[in-house]
Amino acid sequence: MRDSEFEFIRTLVYENSRISLSPEKRELVVTRLGKRMRATQSPTIGAYCALLRDPQSGDELAHLIDAISTNHTFFFRESPHFDFVRSTIVPEMLSRRVAERWPRLYAWSAACSSGEEPYSLAMVLQETIPEATNWRWHIECTDISHRILATARNAIYHRDVVTKLSPATIKAHFQRGIGPEDGNYRIKPALRAGLSFQQKNLLEGEPPFREPFHLIFCRNVMIYFDRATQAELVQKLSERLIPGGYLLVGHSESLTGIKHSLQQVRPAIYRRPPNS
Ligand SMILES: C[S@@+](CC[C@H](N)C(=O)[O-])C[C@H]1O[C@@H](n2cnc3c(N)ncnc32)[C@H](O)[C@@H]1O
């Protein structure tokens, strides 16, 4: 890959997703471009760059960002976060809900990838909020990638992924596929009903939600952004929390060195001060 081609791809990806591709990522970029070059029948990287420059290239920019971004995720990833939701966030919000007149617990999985993160959260909420309280919950799920959101909406996961969960969790929250779906499991409709999915670039414009959130998961996406972009994003997300609401980031995404107004309560768990 020529320097000028890497620079062109790097700038295009940064301007459209804010994913920051350092020179060390060059080999990775070449590998990921290979897939798009085959799909678009571009014989060389130069030809592929020319296609991207062509105003008629249609969706190719979205496909490029899809190919560059990493969608790796799994159920109950970074399990201390889910333990904390169970032990602290839900009881705290339940105890405040009547005085604050909250009709439901409202959460956002920002950069939800193929859905394992928000469905894990949904399982915890469904299991932790006592039915007798009649308190509902809802999770907004967003990602930059249309392709990965389609997988998340489908909520179908392969046996190899699902059978890592406990038998009780599988029984409570999954339907086993039959016939052509043998070997797959689907999240039960009752759980799916509590999630909405929409495409959203976290760094573009304002989040499309008006109601403030009790908790936001924004995990394992900030690592792809430079420090200035991370600071901008943390500020945006903080403004979307209720006073006393929680922001959970990936355990490798410390906010140290970023100017923010949140209190750290645990590793990778931050809280908007209750009186702010
Ligand atoms: C590694 S996955 C993390 C999934 C999940 N949050 C987790 O921790 O397991 C990163 C996700 O961020 C998404 N992403 C990357 N840049 C984004 C942006 N600017 N806005 C929204 N989503 C973005 C990618 O499409 C990908 O699905």
Image (tube, helix red, strand yellow):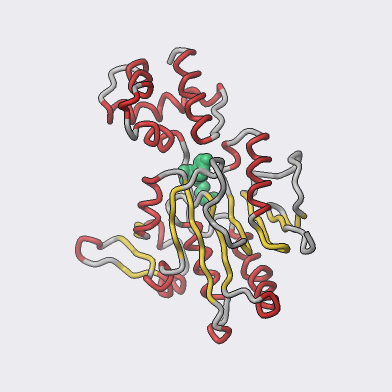
Residue 1 in sight in this render: yes
Q: Does 194 sit above or below residue 148?
A: below
Q: Which part of the image, by quadrant, shows the N terminus?
A: top left
Q: Does 53 sit above or below residue 215?
A: above
In-image side of 102 versus 37 (left or right)? right
Location of residue 133 in the rendering, given as x and y in whole percent from the top left corner: 58, 84
- The residue located at (31%, 68%) in the rendering is 176
- The residue located at (46%, 71%) in the rendering is 169
Q: Which part of the image, by quadrant, shows the C terminus?
A: bottom right
- All told, the count of numbered labels is 0
Location of residue 41 in the rendering, given as x and y in whole percent from the top left corner: 25, 24
Location of residue 231 in the rendering, given as x and y in whole percent from the top left corner: 68, 40
> Which residue sits furthest right?
275
> Which residue sits furthest left?
179
In-image side of 197 versus 224 (left or right)? left
Residue 197 lies in quadrant: bottom left
Residue 159 in sight in this render: no
Q: Does 124 sit above or below residue 47?
A: below
- The residue located at (43%, 75%) in the rendering is 172
In-image side of 85 versus 127 (left or right)? right
- The residue located at (47%, 19%) in the rendering is 8
Residue 266 lies in quadrant: bottom right
